Amino acid sequence: MLAKTTFTGTLVKDPELGDFNGTPFCNFTVAKNKKYKEKQETCFMDCVAWGKPAEIIAQYMKKGEYHEFSCEIKQQAWDDKATGAKRSKIVFNVTEFDFGRNPKKEETPFN
């Protein structure tokens, strides 16, 4: 069973469309701001979408826009080519999305 989550956030840069063995995929990063007390914390989430959703995201979503994403959470692991060290990171595999609007200026620091 995979862990799943839904979040809203701002695209940090324009999504990048690629091709893997004939299947389109799209990589992008989403930022989510959280304010507590007098501090602001930003969380950056690396995302990937596959197939038709990837094509739609790459065509219609742009840097600075605020959207909602439903994802499966996966951990990628690899060996660093330069050092040989083991590396890993969490990636959000987008399964569904909804076009959003910017709710307020504080949510979009990457415009």
Image (spheres, rainbow, N blue to C red):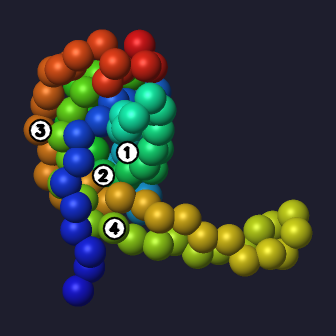
State which tag comes first along the sequence, 4 or 3: 4
Q: Is 79 situated above or below 70?
A: below
Q: Earlier in the sequence, mark 2 or mark 4?
A: 2
- Front residue (pair 21, 55): 55
The numbered mark at residue 49 is: 2
Check disc 3 and report the residue beneath it. 98
Query: Which residue is at 44% across, 29% downward?
Result: 38
Classify mark 4: residues with Cα within 10 Å, few (<14), some (14-19) or many (20+).
some
Q: Earlier in the sequence, mark 1 or mark 3?
A: 1
Q: Is residue 85 left or right of residue 69?
A: right
Instruction: Look at label 4 and name its amino acid.
Output: Ile
Q: Amino acid at mark 3?
A: Asp
- Nearer to us of marks 1 and 4 is 4
Q: Foreground residue, 54 or 31?
A: 31
**Which residue shows up at 51% across the image and 71% down it?**
76
Q: Secondary structure at mark 2?
A: strand
Pointer 1 local density, CA inside 10 Å: few below 14, some 14–19, many at least 20? many
Image position of 100 with respect to 48: above or below:
above
Residue that protrudes farthest toward the bottom in the picture:
1
Which residue in the protein does label 4 denote? 73
Q: Secondary structure at mark 3?
A: strand
Q: Secondary structure at mark 1?
A: strand
Disc 2 + disc 1, Cβ < 8 Å:
yes
Viewer-proximal residue among 93 and 68: 68
Q: Is residue 71 above or below residue 15?
A: below
Residue on which the image places disc 1: 26
Packing grade of label 3 (10 A; few <14, some 14-19, many >=20) is few
At a point 81% along the width and 67% down the height, the residue shown is 81
Q: Amino acid at mark 2?
A: Ala
Q: Amino acid at mark 1?
A: Cys
Q: Are marks 1 and 4 in contact (CB under 8 Å)?
A: no
Mark positioned earlier in the residue sequence (1 or 4)? 1
